[in-house]
Amino acid sequence: MKKSFRTFVTSTILSLAVCFNLAAVNSASYEATAFTILDEAYSLMNVLDWKNLKFSSLYYFSNINSSGSGNLTVAFYTKKKNTVALGWEGSLWDNASLNNFSFFYGWDKFAVAADFTEHVNSVWYLDGNICSNYKEFAGKVDFGYVINKKFSTSLSFGYSNIAGTITNTKINYSIFAPNLVLLYNLKEDKKSKSSMAIEYEGKFSLRTQTVGKKITETNYSQNKLTTSYKYNYSLSPKITYGFTGTIPCTLTLGDNIPRQIIIDFALSNGLSFVLNPDKLILNTGLKITLPTITFTESQSMQTDSFYTNLYLGLSLIINPSLTLDLVTGIDPIYGLSPQNLFNQAFRITIKGKM
């Protein structure tokens, strides 16, 4: 029972990460290269990379996927040439209320971003069970500072409250989430760009369980340290290669659960091919997740299997100021038959500027 409950709690804490993300502005072309080859949208609302987004007066971004969520983000300049961006992300055809609102402001070497998320559903999932009257409210503030051409750093603070009822038990989570990023730009020229980053993510949760008049409180914490490396290189005017490597190490602690350390390894490679100059680009990528190593208190070390994710997409350049991207993810385990390809989830993004 303890092991099952630990699994539910750990899964819940991990799932809370989505509450603390700004509106998703990753383009389909970036995703199609297994999140390796950076594009303009990567800099949108990015408190460390925002100056790399260039446009005349307005930049707009929108995405929609087959699971029913969408996004709309616009960026513009103030009279003093500072950058402002506003974003919304939410469910397009779901009966539940799920929305995220974002704000960004960048000036000089500084940037600040904030977002608010609300999710209200009559029936949802919590602690591995179906719960009723699910309510989730979360907010985050993110500060970025470009120290010089080599170093940048960001600091953020997030808070989330989640509540629901499982049978006759009321469950409530209060989560505080600090985050710190240190970024070092190794090299940047006309052909290549590389960087290293160290990121700390914390989640400190208070879980309250109420049955009748009996209230039980338990505390959980999760500390995650991720080292990452990104590299982009133009092999030729028509071919660009991207690589990303990450090593996250996560420590989970809590009342009535054993101490646990998880070490992950992920390697991603991406390629972008210009099929028709200024008209059509083919994007593809492969993410390989190496066996996770898990150390659980009073238990033997455990490892799992290799996992691979294949991405494929197209970028249709309608004109120099408007691009349409399409991406789908493929799991090779289930084969690559035409029927499987047709049934894959997809996402479409629109990037434009004026």
Image (tube, rainbow, N blue to C red):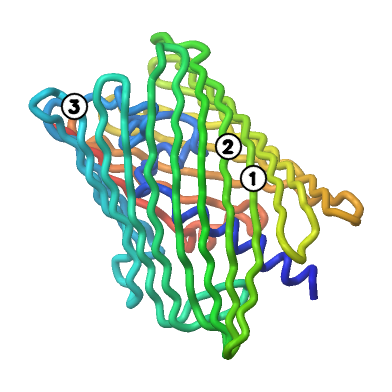
Q: Earlier in the sequence, mark 2 or mark 3?
A: 3
**The N terminus lies in quadrant:** bottom right
Q: Earlier in the sequence, mark 1 or mark 3?
A: 3
* Element assignment for label 2: strand
Three-letter amino acid code of the residue under disc 1: Asn
Residue at the image position 46 percent from the left and 64 percent from the top: 161
Residue at the image position 44 percent from the left and 40 percent from the top: 156
Check if mark 2's residue and mark 1's residue have beta carbons within 8 Å: yes
User: Is residue 230 depicted above or below 193 in this figure?
Assistant: below
- Would you name the residue on which mark 2 appears? 200
Three-letter amino acid code of the residue under disc 3: Asn
Residue 112 picture location, percent across and down: 32, 35
Q: Nearer the viewer, residue 227 or 334?
A: 227
* Element assignment for label 3: loop
Furthest toward the left, the residue is: 79
Mark 1 vs mark 3: in front = 1
Residue 257 picture location, percent across and down: 77, 63
User: Is residue 77 depicted above or below 141 in this figure?
Assistant: above
Q: Earlier in the sequence, mark 2 or mark 1?
A: 2
Q: Nearer the viewer, residue 37 or 102?
A: 102
Q: Nearer the viewer, residue 317 or 80?
A: 80
Residue at the image position 23 percent from the left and 39 percent from the top: 85
Residue 193 picture location, percent across and down: 47, 16
CA gap, disc 1 and disc 3 = 35 Å
**The C terminus lies in quadrant:** top left
Three-letter amino acid code of the residue under disc 2: Tyr
Crowd class of label 1 (few under 14; some 14 to 19; many from 20; radius 10 Å): some
- Would you name the residue on which mark 3 appears? 82
* Element assignment for label 1: strand
CA gap, disc 2 and disc 1 = 7 Å
Residue at the image position 59 percent from the left and 59 percent from the top: 13
Left or right for 227, reference 234: right
